Amino acid sequence: MKDQRIPWDQYFMMQAVLLSTRSTCERLSVGATIVRDKRIIAGGYNGSVSGDVHCIDEGCYLVDGHCVRTIHAEMNAILQCAKFGAATDGAEIYVTDFPCLQCTKMLLQAGITKIHYLRNYHNDAYAMSLIERKHVALQQVAFDQTDLDKLGLAHILLNRN
């Protein structure tokens, strides 16, 4: 009998998509899931420092076109590992949108060995060159339209917000 389960890459990306629904950013909802040995070790979404005001309540705090209030999903996931003592060396990350340059540098420094992403988002050329130089695998995860229809999640996966 054929295995009818969702493939691992889609499964972990769905976890990142689910996390993105907790985002408090008005500009882009991003989720990230860190995985080692096919086990989720942390997750994060973009939002304010715990206990601070949220962009969805007071608007974004923009400086030079960037919201300085928001902690990126990738950083929140890495910080969760640090807070609870989960090693990131050799782990993989699933993120809904291609990581920015700062997050890419942080992921590489944390020992992430593979970056899976759902959507392209201002893919930075220097980030790409760092990923290549560090020999970190990069994979865009795709979803089959039939599976999306079955799950009823096409609108979340295919739209930025």
Image: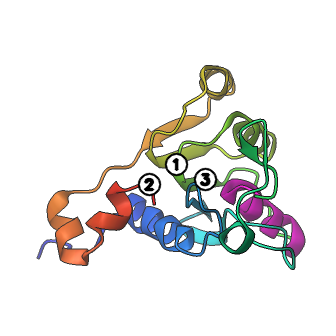
- Give the residues drawn in magenta, as a range: 71-84
Residue receiving disc 1: 97
Point out residue 116 in the picture as x, y percentages from the top left corner: 50, 48
- In this orientation, which residue lies closer to the viewer: 83 or 155? 155
- In this orientation, which residue lies closer to the viewer: 118 or 122? 122
Drawn side of residue 37 relative to residue 130, left or right:
left
Q: Earlier in the sequence, mark 3 or mark 2?
A: 3
Q: CA distance from mark 3 to mark 1?
A: 15 Å
Residue lying at the far front of the rendered structure: 58
Residue at the (57%, 59%) spot, across then down: 30
Does residue 86 belong to the magenta stretch?
A: no
Drawn side of residue 96 relative to residue 158, left or right:
right
> Is 72 situated above or below 24?
above
Residue contact at pointers 2 and 1, CB within 8 angstroms: yes
Mark 3, mark 1: which one is toward the viewer? 1
Residue receiving disc 2: 160
Q: Amino acid at mark 1?
A: Asp
Point out residue 49 in the picture as x, y percentages from the top left corner: 84, 68
> Tell me, what colour scheme is on the image?
rainbow
Q: CA distance from mark 3 to mark 2?
A: 23 Å
Image quadrant where one finds the N terminus: bottom left
Q: Earlier in the sequence, mark 2 or mark 1?
A: 1
Residue at the (56%, 55%) spot, across then down: 28
